[in-house]
Every structure is written in structure tokens, then in C-alpha cells.
Image: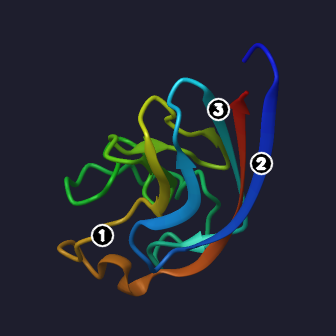
Amino acid sequence: MNGTYQTQTFNVTINANQPWQNTGVYISTPGKQFVTIQATGNWVNNPVSGPHDANGAPGYICTDPNYPLRGALEGCLVGMTGGSLPYFVGINGVANTSVAGMIQLVINDDLSGKVGNGLGDNSGSLSVTITLLTTT
């Protein structure tokens, strides 16, 4: 981004056993804002795969349509901005800032509970730092 900008930092906890969670970060001027997201910690989306970081459970690629992000690892950190399509965040990602709306985060798991236990057997949380740069 060129020019002057304002930087804001937000710290949130994203729980493995909760559906889409608001971060408190709102994209109000698409194209004039940039967001980085860093996640630390471990969580569990399936007791069989055990604890893992925000990049997801190694070897468990999601193919089920009940998961927010097919083609990504189960248990990875996923984002959504406003009504955008879900996108991969992982341990160090960027948010979609091409649309206006609240940035939400969630674990990549069966949010509807139609496959296995859904969010019911999840545990843990991630500490997430979100940095918002806005062109002024």
C-alpha cells in the first residue's frame, strides 16, 4: 500500500468448538485496507488426529461439503469477510478485503454436525492477532 496509513491491532481467541466467530474487525473501505492474521496455539477437531496448529491436521484433507473450506486440511483456521467465500488463513495469512463486512474465523470442521460429532468433540483454542492497515 502506498501513502500514509493507520495501523490497528486486535487480539482475539478463536475456540475450536464454536461456529463462525466475529473478530471485531470490520472492512469498511474495500481496496483501501489490508489485513494480516497470525494464529498461535493448538486445537483438536477430531480426537483421532490429535492436537494441531492453525494449518490443520496433517494428512486429513477435507472433501465433505459440510465443511467451510473443502480442499484444505481439516482443522485449519478459515476466514470469511462479510458474505465472501471462505478462505484459508492458517498460522499466518491474509484476509479477503475486497468486500465490506466483518471478518469471521472458524475451525475447518463439520459446522452442521452432519458428519461425525461436528464441533461436539472439538477442544482448545487459538490466540489470534489481526493487524489492520487502512490507507488514509
Residue 34 numbered mark, or none: 3
Instruction: Identify the mark nearer the N-term, 1 or 3.
Output: 3
Q: In this view, does 128 lie to the left or right of 104?
A: right
**Tag 2 and tag 1, C-beta contact below 8 Å:** no
> Which mark is nearer the camera, 2 or 1?
2
The answer for how far apart the CA atoms under marks 2 and 1 are is 30 Å
Residue 91 position within the rendered picture, expressed as x and y whole percent measured from the top left = 67, 49
Amino acid carrying label 3: it is Phe
The residue under label 2 is which amino acid type?
Answer: Gln
Amino acid identity at mark 1: Leu
Q: Do the residues labelled 1 and 3 touch (CB within 8 Å)?
A: no
In-image side of 62 versus 101 (left or right): left
User: Gap between marks 2 and 3, in whole Å?
Assistant: 11 Å
First in sequence, mark 2 or 1: give its number: 2
Q: Which residue is drawn at 37% across and 79% down?
A: 119
Crowdedness near tag 1: few (<14), some (14–19) or many (≥20) residues, C-alpha within 10 Å? many
Pointer 2: residues within 10 angstroms few (<14), some, or many (20+)? few
Disc 1 target residue: 111
> Residue at image x 44%, y 74%?
46
Q: Mark 2 points at which residue?
A: 8
Mark 1 to mark 3 CA distance (whole Å):
28 Å
- Check whether the beta carbons of the residues at disc 2 and disc 3 lie within 8 A of each other: no
